[in-house]
Image (cartoon, rainbow, N blue to C red):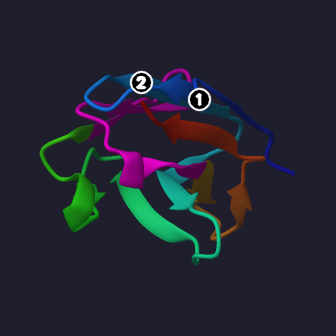
């Protein structure tokens, strides 16, 4: 079983920044973040492979940056210029080289005046 420990959510005002982190165990291929707003489906925010290839949702390109520390099996999501529409529960997701996938418990991000 893969253990995921998320941190970094909170309440911020529009235009401010937050950084999420997620520490995992195991031989991990892809690490990423997804989000789910009330009454909406969970959707991709960003992913990064063990080789450093990244993929972003169009809505966050230029504002969010995903990175990872392979030695620590930790993925980060730097979120800048946050907007109210970024409000959601953010979930860490990992895909192991074996194909096994696991989700974190979620961390709330709220962007409000």
Whether residues under marks 2 and 1 lie with C-beta atoms below 8 angstroms apart, the answer is yes
- Alpha-carbon distance for marks 2 and 1? 7 Å
Question: Which disc, if any, is residue 47?
Answer: none
Going from N to C along the chain, the mark reached first, 2 or 1, is: 1
Viewed as shown, does residue 3 lie left or right of 6?
right
* Lateral position of residue 12 relative to residue 48, left or right: right
**Residue at image point 43% right, 24% down:** 19
SS of the residue at dot 1?
loop
- Residue 107 belongs to the span the image colors magenta: no
Please, is residue 37 above or below residue 107 in the view? Answer: below
For the residue labelled by badge 2, is the local secondary structure a helix, a strand or a loop? strand
Could you say where residue 105 lies in the image, as x and y percent from the top left?
A: 78, 47
Q: Which mark is residue 9?
A: 1
Does the image show residue 55?
Answer: yes
Q: Sort mark 1 into few (<14), some (14-19) or many (20+) by Cα contacts within 10 Å.
A: some
Q: Quadrant of residue 83?
A: top left
Q: Residue furthest front?
A: 113
Q: Residue at x 39, y 58 (%)?
A: 45
Tag 2 residue: 18
Q: Is residue 83 above or below residue 103?
A: above
For the magenta stretch, what is the residue range? 65-89
- Quadrant location of the C terminus in the rendered image: top left
- Name the one closer to the observer, 48 or 110: 110
How far from the left and from the top, in percent, is residue 42? 57, 71
Q: Is residue 78 above or below residue 106?
A: above
């Amino acid at each position: 079983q893969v253990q995921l420990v998320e941190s970094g959510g909170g309440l911020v005002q529009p235009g401010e920044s937050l950084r999420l982190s997620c520490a995992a165990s195991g031989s991990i291929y892809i690490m990423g973040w997804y989000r789910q707003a009330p009454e909406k489906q969970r959707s991709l925010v960003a992913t990064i492979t063990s080789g450093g290839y990244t993929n972003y949702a169009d809505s966050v390109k230029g504002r969010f940056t995903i990175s990872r520390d392979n030695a620590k099996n930790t993925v980060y999501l730097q979120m800048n210029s946050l907007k109210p529409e970024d409000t959601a529960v953010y979930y860490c997701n990992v895909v192991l080289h074996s194909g096994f996938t696991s989700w974190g418990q979620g961390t709330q991000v709220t962007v409000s005046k």
